[in-house]
Amino acid sequence: MNYYLVKYSGPFGFIKPWTAVRDSETFSQQFLTPSIVEGLRQKLGVKTILRHKLTYNGITRQQEVTHTRGWNYQRAKALHQRYRSILIRGLMLNPILWLAFEDHSDAEKAIRQHICLCRNEDILLPEGEVLEVTERDFNKLSGFELRFEENERSFLVGFDRFKEGEPMYGWLDVTGNPLRSGTLL
């Protein structure tokens, strides 16, 4: 089977940790969950995204301020107040994301659009031309790929926002050196 590849890149990218914990440090994941890929599919308006590979140069720690959802009222001071927290999150430097499509027309549609991994400000732009490669050649690309299937190597990777919080499982396929210092392909 041949795949039609589209390469996306940008200066930085953020993947929301599926646990959404409010720890003092929360780092980005090294893989895209099934609901992230489904969100990309919907945004691009394509039939399917068969596979993906993600690489990056490193992770930088970024500080983020969050506010609580509700307000606290202090009657004595007649003061409404929202509490804040400071989180440290991981941000990928120079990510490259390869998306593999079954259909050439889907790849052509995708290469004319930008994508965001999880935040609108983390834009990745298409680069180059649509490439046709065999499945064997795709498997040789360096990168992190979460394979969306449940087997003995699978682990819980989150809860699907498109399927009423249904648990999502997958196994991490790490090929080559996904933390790159050079170029790919």
Image (cartoon, rainbow, N blue to C red):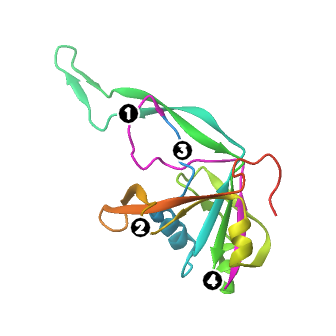
Image: magenta residue range: 1-25
Tell me the SS state at disc 3: loop
**Foreground of the two, 86 or 74:** 86
Viewed as shown, does residue 116 lie left or right of 160?
right
Residue type for callout 2:
Glu
Q: Residue at x 55, y 55 (%)?
A: 31
| Residue at image mark 1 | 67
Q: Nearer the viewer, mark 1 or mark 4?
A: 4
Name the residue located 47 percent from the left edge and 65 percent from the top edge.
34
Rate crowding at label 2 as few (under 14), some (14 to 19) or many (20 or more) other CA atoms within 10 Å: few
Query: Sequence-wise, which precedes: disc 3 or disc 1?
Result: 3
Q: Is residue 5 magenta?
A: yes
- Whether 19 is among the magenta residues is yes
In the image, farthest residue toward the front: 152
Tags 1 and 4 in contact by the CB under 8 Å rule?
A: no
The circle drawn on residue 59 is none
**Could you tell me if the residues under marks 4 and 2 are in contact, i.e. CB atoms within 8 Å?**
no
Q: Are marks 3 and 1 in contact (CB under 8 Å)?
A: no
Q: Which mark is residue 150?
A: 2
